[in-house]
């Protein structure tokens, strides 16, 4: 009888990799992520295929690029010529997106028990796409006084902070999971996505502005509407929707260093949840029977190039941490020269479970590289609301799309990431780019769009 590997996908929200020790950084205190990296495999270059929450998560669950999984929309349910309908606080019944067999459906049909805990932010309810059980919060971000539903049941708001509540949900699941079958746990941690001022004091004040070394491509003077964006980071919807009075004023002297310090505190807080996960696996005798994959849905600009948050075709927005740890993997390995992306997660987990990869998947398994075999030099396809592009080991190449979704005739953005790691020199008018353009154009033709009619 085949013994299937348990699977945990642990996804942070809006977390870039640069400051982590396993990516060469020294700014952050993240002992649990550091330990996971020491015991596992780290991809030097991994990206999101669409640097916005709903699309990135839909890519992971569907195994398809966002244009096929959701029709190319961003954090909205659907889009017409005259209107953009944003997701409500909870998913809606039905399945207008993710119309092909999902990751939990494939695993579930092979005997896995599938559980989702934490941020969801996909259009359909978890049970509609293959999860057996779930505890998910409102779409809008709140670290305290968050509202949840368990398995579609009555709303409730647990005391304290979301990170600790969800960590306890994870521990409860691992201790009380159905016996006699493997499990897939999809665990989503909301920080460091804002509200970064709504976190425990220990982490809110863990770093000070004098501790912060900004990335070399940050110039605070280039940030448009700084006051607004800083309040969005600190208070999220309680500022931009509710305009609660306490969200309308920034602390005296607040600047990009203060903002970054609070973001770092949110990362360190998130790291405690990773530690709780790993401790719970060890205490339940599951650690050596479980593949753990840690990543983020997308990065965060934090002022680089004058940009805030995500949704743009540069490394601060596109790049994510990607760490795998578990049985049969080459512990302490770093994968160079090959770009992994979120669309590769579905086939990776199917191979880890000993199951065939469905033909509708757009990615390729990462497992052979995680087991120490030769790097394949692959590139990754990405899209944003305005661009389609390729991220190769050395180059970022992006082409703008017109209103009819057609690629423009020439590239818009080209960065040599080896010579220019902070992406300050756009080479689109000087580089020889015919091969990359041709490859992008081929992918653009090969990858179908989900018709917008199906999202109404």
Image (cartoon, rainbow, N blue to C red):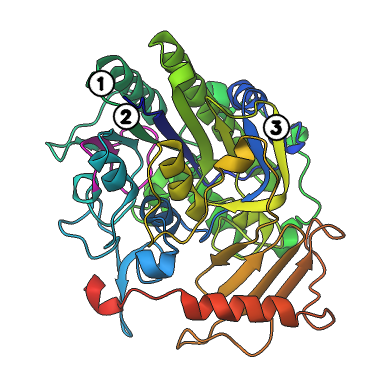
Q: Which mark is residue 42?
A: none
Q: What element carries label 2?
A: strand
Q: What element carries label 3?
A: strand
Q: Which mark is residue 177?
A: 1
Q: Is residue 219 left or right of residue 290?
A: right
Q: How many marks overall?
A: 3
Q: Please provide percent x and percent y for residue 143.
A: 40, 35
Pointer 1 local density, CA inside 10 Å: few below 14, some 14–19, many at least 20: some
Q: Is residue 56 left or right of residue 122?
A: right
Q: Distance between the residues labelled 3 and 1?
A: 31 Å
Q: In which quarter of the image is the N terminus?
A: top left
Q: Distance between the residues labelled 3 and 2?
A: 26 Å
Question: In this rendering, is residue 343 above or below 181?
Answer: below
Residue that extends furthest to the right in the rendered view of this protein: 419
Residue that mark 2 sits on: 183
Q: Which of marks 3 and 1 is nearer the N terminus?
A: 1
Q: Is residue 27 left or right of residue 4?
A: right
Regarding residue 276, the answer to whether it shows in the image is no
Foreground of the two, 263 or 49? 49
Residue 134 lies in the magenta stretch: yes
Regarding residue 366, the answer to whether it shows in the image is yes
Q: Tell me whether circle 2 and circle 1 mark residues in contact (CB < 8 Å).
A: yes
Foreground of the two, 331 or 433? 331
Q: Please provide percent x and percent y for residue 298.
A: 54, 51
Question: In this rendering, is residue 356 above or below 409?
Answer: above
Foreground of the two, 198 or 349? 349
Q: Earlier in the sequence, mark 3 or mark 2?
A: 2
Q: Report which quarter residue 422 is drawn in.
A: bottom right
Magenta region, main secondary structure: loop
Q: What stretch is highlighted in magenta?
A: 130-147
Q: Which mark is residue 333?
A: 3
Q: Which of marks 2 and 1 is nearer the N terminus?
A: 1
């Amino acid at each position: 009888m085949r013994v299937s590997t348990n699977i945990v996908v642990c996804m942070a929200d809006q977390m870039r990799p640069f400051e982590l020790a396993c990516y060469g950084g020294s700014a952050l205190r993240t002992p649990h992520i550091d330990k996971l990296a020491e015991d596992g495999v780290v991809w030097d270059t991994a990206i999101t295929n669409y640097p916005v929450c709903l699309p990135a998560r839909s890519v992971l669950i569907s195994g398809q690029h966002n244009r096929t999984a959701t029709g190319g929309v961003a954090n909205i349910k659907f889009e017409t010529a005259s209107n953009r309908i944003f997701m409500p606080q909870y998913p809606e019944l039905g399945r207008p997106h993710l119309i092909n067999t999902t990751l939990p459906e494939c695993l579930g049909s092979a005997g896995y028990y599938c559980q989702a805990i934490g941020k969801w932010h996909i259009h359909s309810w978890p049970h509609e796409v293959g999860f057996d059980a779930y505890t998910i919060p409102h779409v809008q971000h709140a670290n305290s006084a968050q509202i949840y539903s368990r398995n579609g049941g009555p709303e409730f708001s647990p005391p304290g902070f979301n990170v600790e509540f969800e960590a306890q949900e994870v521990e409860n699941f691992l201790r009380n999971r159905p016996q006699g079958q493997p499990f897939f746990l999809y665990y989503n941690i909301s920080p460091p996505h804002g509200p970064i001022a709504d976190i425990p004091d220990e982490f809110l004040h863990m770093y000070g502005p004098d501790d912060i070394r900004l990335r070399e491509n940050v110039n605070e003077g280039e940030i448009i509407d700084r006051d607004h964006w800083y309040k969005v980071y600190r208070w999220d919807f309680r500022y931009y929707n509710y305009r609660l009075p306490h969200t309308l004023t920034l602390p005296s002297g607040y600047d990009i260093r203060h903002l970054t310090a609070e973001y770092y505190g949110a990362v360190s807080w998130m790291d405690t949840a990773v530690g709780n996960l790993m401790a719970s696996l060890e205490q339940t005798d599951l650690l050596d029977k479980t593949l753990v994959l840690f990543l983020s849905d997308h990065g965060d600009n934090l002022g680089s190039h004058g940009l805030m948050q995500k949704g743009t075709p540069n490394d601060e927005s596109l790049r994510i941490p990607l760490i795998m740890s578990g049985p049969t993997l080459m512990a302490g390995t770093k994968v160079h020269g090959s770009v992994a992306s979120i669309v590769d997660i579905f086939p990776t987990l199917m191979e880890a479970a000993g199951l065939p990869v469905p033909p509708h998947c757009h990615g390729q398994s990462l497992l052979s590289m995680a087991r120490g075999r030769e790097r394949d030099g692959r590139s990754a396809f990405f899209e944003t609301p305005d661009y389609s592009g390729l991220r190769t080991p050395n180059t970022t190449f992006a082409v703008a799309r017109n209103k009819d979704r057609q690629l423009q005739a020439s590239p818009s953005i080209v960065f040599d990431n080896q010579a220019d790691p902070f992406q300050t020199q756009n080479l689109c008018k000087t580089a020889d780019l015919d091969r990359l353009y041709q490859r992008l154009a081929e992918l653009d033709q090969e990858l179908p769009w989900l018709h917008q009619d199906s999202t109404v």
